Amino acid sequence: MHYVLHYGQIAPYLPYLMGGMAISLALSILSFIGGMVLGLFFAVIRNEGHPVAGRLVRIYVAFFTNTPQLVQIYVIYFGLPDFGILFSPFAAVLIGMTLNAAAYLTEILRAGLSTVHAQELDAAETLGMNRLQTLRHVTLPHLFKVAMPALTNQYILMTLGTSMAAIFGVEELTGRAFNINSTTFRSIEIFTTVAALYVVVTFIATILLALVGRWAFRARVPVL
Amino acid sequence: MAHLDIRGLVARYNNATVLDGIDLSIERGEIVSLIGPSGSGKSTLLRVISGLLPPRAGTVALAGETINYADRRSLRRSRDKLAIVFQQYNLFGNMNVLRNVMVAPVTIQKRDKKTVEAEACALLAKVGLADKLNAYPDELSGGQQQRVAIARALCLKPDILLLDEVTSALDPERVGEVLDTVKMLAADNMTLLIVSHEMGFVREVSHRVAFMADGKIQEMGPPAQIFGTPQQPRTQAFVSRILGH
Ligand SMILES: Nc1ncnc2c1ncn2[C@@H]1O[C@H](COP(=O)(O)OP(=O)(O)OP(=O)(O)O)[C@@H](O)[C@H]1O
Ligand SMILES: [Mg+2]
């Protein structure tokens, strides 16, 4: 049989797909930022060796890195309503992704923190810096510099992971692709186009993050 | 009144007593060198004085004011007056040379940025690094990094400077540049406590030399005494070994 590729038929849907892309990006960027804030907090707790708080963080990380993200979001979206906590699909996915990202980012950031040179910390202390000043001027710049490649990688994974939101009815890029598919049945054209869009987006993100790393933190990340 | 007055100082790592009752009194403008075998506790003494390792017993007083190492404010006050340069330079890898020197005066002492910058540039010029202001530590030689570390300490305008083997990580050609810098400080009438293995240098710049072993100061006196006519057998053994007799 002959299947004639007909990309022209999905061209009118491009703006619609772009809108979905914006939702995907919103999910990945927001959950990455949220995950970074939580992860940084957890990583510092872990690194300070606080006995109780450190153990709680370890349990948190173990839980979220050893269960499927899909199941985590299921619990939030379908499980929590039983306790009277209701979320929109978007909110449920965002919360699930943020909590999940926090666990992975905790591990990445903690590994980075452990590479901060003890001598630099000694210098900071004897120069009179308090903890917060040390964190801001010494620890964090070093951390972002060494962790930049791993953080970039994590962000890319999260961008691709947003496609899972389609399962919950969030009309992000993949969700909209499903919608178009069910009316046009141009599966190959649609999903290759969508795949290409993901490639473009992750490619741009990789470059942007590499540039940020270079300029802000002197990270030696090849831009390409 | 002594500028730096140390009495009965005891320090431990885990259960090992590293400083076992140190008494040391240094006058304003005096240069005292600490010598002694590896592991005798010289670096530990500087770490305790600068507040990186809390003492188990004894006191340290700066210009008559005893430092309370358990009190952040007291510690802060002491760090305004006292600076330390480490053996491994300990520069901040994420900052260029100028920022390394400026960060503490600007962010901690809250001094005017323009003024600090002018002072930092002058100090860096003084140690021969005027053309390296924008370089990062990993782009500098060991001797250059060590001189940045000295400039960083000086920019805090300390009354007392502690120097821990500032030349030991350097190759011989670089040692000279750093020693010249230290001699310059000595000429400025700063109070200096120097740990060094460079006996020629110690003999040349020190007013007094303290020989340390087993966590105690075994003998102390002018360089002529320590290197020429040491009183204690342990000092004699150390000095004759290190001077190669
Ligand atoms: N962080 C540490 N933890 C445990 N023990 C330590 C630590 N630092 C130093 N020590 C021990 O304390 C003793 C004194 O060490 P210190 O570094 O003060 O010696 P030093 O006189 O400076 O020697 P060197 O001339 O080799 O620099 C040594 O026995 C050393 O093993
Ligand atoms: Mg030492």
Image (spheres, coloured by chain):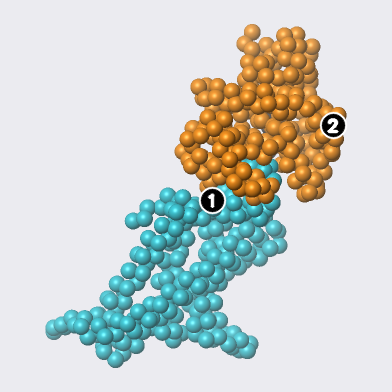
Chain colours: A cyan, B orange
**Circle 2 residues within 10 Å: few <14, some 14–19, many ≥20:** some
Residue A6 in sight here: yes
Disc 1 packing (10 Å; few <14; some 14–19; many ≥20) = many
Q: What residue type is labelled 2?
A: Arg
Q: Position of residue B79 (x, y in %)?
A: 73, 41
Q: Which chain carries label 1?
A: A
Q: Residue at x 80, y 45 (%)?
A: B74
Position of A211 relative to B189 (above/below): below
Residue B236, image x and y in percent?
Answer: 73, 12
Which numbered dot is residue A203? Answer: none
| Residue linked to disc 1 | A142
Q: Is residue B189 left or right of residue B88?
A: right
**Residue A203 in which image quadrant:** bottom left
For disc 2, the marked residue is B7
- Looking at this view, is B76 or A84 the one in front? B76
Q: Is residue B49 above or below residue A14?
A: above
Q: Can residue B22 be seen in this view?
A: no
Which percent across, then down, holds residue B32?
73, 23
- Quarter of the rendering occupied by the N terminus of chain B: top right
Amino acid carrying mark 1 in the image: His
